[in-house]
Image (tube, helix red, strand yellow):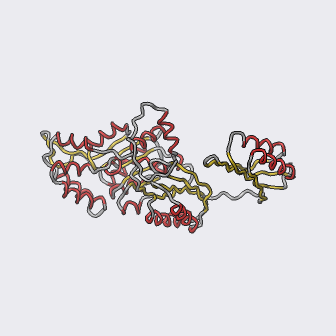
Amino acid sequence: MTVSKTILVSVNGPDHPGISAGLMDVLAAGGAEIYDVEQIVVRGRLTLNVLIGVDAEGATVRDLLFFGWKEDLQIDFERIEAAPPPIKPMSIVTVIGSTVSARDFGDVARAIADGGGNIERIYRLSRYPVVSYELAISNGDVSEIRASLVRVAAASPIDVAIQPDGLERRARRLVVMDIDSTLIQQEVIDLLAREAGVEERVSEITAAAMAGEIEFEESLRERVGLLKGLDEEALRRVAASMTITPGARTFIRTLKRLGMKTAIVSAGFTRFANQLAADLEIDYSLSNTLEVEDGLLTGGLSGELVDAPRKATFLKEVAAKENIPLSQVVAIGDGANDLDMLAAAGLGIAFNAKPLVKERADTSLTVPFLDAILFVMGVRRDHVEAADAADPEVDRDPPIEVPGSPPV
């Protein structure tokens, strides 16, 4: 048929099964062509938009109004241009927080608008252990929007990330993460220093090194030298005292369900990294090795030094072995010695990181739950929960108390 009218049909009202089917029956009977369809249901309320082409809209419009009356729906019509809009560059903004207030949302929306972007779609990814939303935005100056969102996040109790939308975002295949203060909540070398009675001095050196204030290799060898004389029993106590970051088991388990490879790389020590890799079923692990003689630490290191360049090289080696493009790799870290690997990955995430790392990473998270990274990757919490519920053998993270959580 020859189409002379293009109409946007907007349907709103209480949702129930059969609405979409009934609407399409009316449109088919009127000979309408379907150009586009979008639907969303929020708390039982339906919003359905259908772009149609008709050659004589009178009968179709009357039939749609009658259908709306029968189904207790509000149906509106708008004549629009027939020509399809040009393809627009799209980005994804992820908003994460213990709560996300109207003011927070407004600040994010204003930052997007001020950068020339337009919000096309919003939907919630999670309500536990944090609230998170994904905003699909079109057009705009991404650099300007990113800078504005960084300022919003700095002034608000929320994290905000922006990344290009496209195939690469949906095709992540490898996640490489740091261990100390990322996969676990402590710095292993600080735990060792406590056993050796030099905790204060080692903590000072660690903080300076992670902030990029002193050269890393020098700082590491100085700290390890202070551990001379620790015995096997002390090492066992340290291994037992490591605390896995909340959400880490959920995070890694979900990555494996998605078919992704996982790796950990650390300037920490092989004994502890290997234990974590075995416990969490992580595919690859690389770290430094403490030198031992006669059951005691010598204060030295043996083998290759794992520093910032080596972390990045390891990421590339694992990606090459698995035949994974670097654009499909996610790297996660918190310290200055993670910067090289964050830069090498397609997506570099600063997790509860030092200011220098936040400034240079692709995106930054400050919530204390490692599985919140799933939301940056576009994974929905209800899908994670459904997969866990179907697996009675799953090794779950302990329940997380989240004060001030919004109602379901």
Residue 223 pos. (x, y %)? 20, 54
Nearest the viewer among 156 and 120 is 156
Q: Residue at x 25, y 43 (%)?
A: 241
Q: Residue at x 69, y 59 (%)?
A: 86
Residue 395 pos. (x, y %)? 39, 35
Q: Residue at x 76, y 52 (%)?
A: 75
Q: Residue at x 73, y 56 (%)?
A: 84
Answer yes or no: is residue 407 visible.
yes
Counting labels gives 0
Left or right of 367 in this view: 7: right
- Judged from this view, the residue extending furthest toward the top is 392
Residue 354 pos. (x, y %)? 35, 60
Answer yes or no: is residue 376 visible.
no
Nearest the viewer among 41 and 154 is 41
| Residue 108 versus residue 326 in the image, above or below | below
Residue 101 pos. (x, y %)? 51, 59
